[in-house]
Image (cartoon, grey):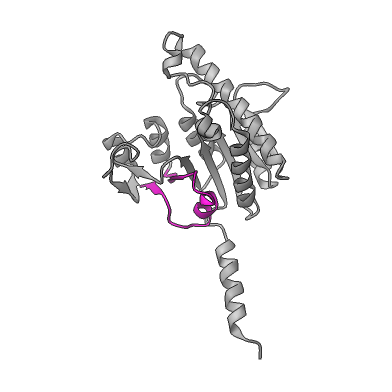
Amino acid sequence: MPSRQPVGRRALRALMQTPAFKRVLLKLSGEALAANQGFGVDTARIHEVAAELADVHKLGVQLAIVVGGGNFFRGVADQARDMDRVSADHMGMLATVINALALQDALEKQNVYTRVQSAIEMKQVAEPFIRRRAIRHLEKGRVVIFAGGTGNPYFSTDTAASLRAMEIKADVILKATKVDGIYDADPLKVKDAKKFENITYMDVLKLGLKVMDSTAISLCKDNNLPIIVFNLNQHGNIRRVVSGEKIGSRVSA
């Protein structure tokens, strides 16, 4: 009779390869694509991120992405303080389109079919956001990158991520940051900052924690959509989160 041990190992490997989520929305900041250079797109970094995303895509996960634009322009930053808020926010939305196109190029170099959908119509470079078309792309195994925020001023890309996640019926929002979870203070500045493994939407709002803005948190709360905050800078973390490993912090009811 054949040994049982190899079968057990194969079963374990198969179990480890099974993603915990079928459809996810990943929120990436623009700063994550700039890496240490602080401005623009770091080509080496964006290809590293694309390789990790391609690895996750191979698991069969339906992957949607909302990318910020802070590496080029942020409507509420000091650089925009003398500008009309609506104009500044529109500039920030256009910055997200630049990042989305850069990420699309990097993903397609990993042989991952990708579509960019923009909330601001620009047919020459991106599809308009159409909910049913986005879902169809995901069902066909394409990665969908949502750009242009919500298309409206005064709403952040965090809010856009929450909105798009609910529109495509994502199982979870994955918020990729430069720290390994949610803390009661900035862990880069406060040595003994306390980390929350699990926290409720209400506690995030009451404590004023800067996980996502209050509009985004409220949207997730009203629709019971969990958020997992984790460190993007640790290689392989996106795959670990999708596979169900308990890393980072989870926001839920």
Give the camera-side residue of 139 and 68.
Answer: 68
Closest to the observer, 192 or 100: 192
x, y percent for residue 117:
64, 31
- What's the magenta region? 224-253
Quarter in which the N terminus is drawn: bottom right
Above-or-below relation of 130 to 195: above
Q: Residue at x 32, y 47 (%)?
A: 195
Q: Is residue 78 visible?
A: yes
Q: Is residue 144 shown left or right of residue 86?
A: right
The magenta stretch spans residue 248: yes
Vertical placement of 118 versus 56: above or below?
Answer: above
Q: Residue at position x 26%, y 45% from top?
A: 192
Image point 59% across, 62% down: which residue? 17
Task: Please tell me which residue lies in front, 104 or 123.
Answer: 104
x and y percent of residue 112 in the render? 70, 44
Counting every numbered tag in the picture gives 0
Question: Left of 45 or right of it: where is 233?
Answer: left
Question: Residue 201: horizontal and vertical position, in percent?
Answer: 34, 41
Query: Is 5 one of the magenta-colored residues?
Result: no
The x and y percentages for residue 28 are 52, 36
Extreme residue in the front direction:
37
Residue 62 placement, left or right of 160: right
Q: Can residue 129 be seen in this view?
A: no
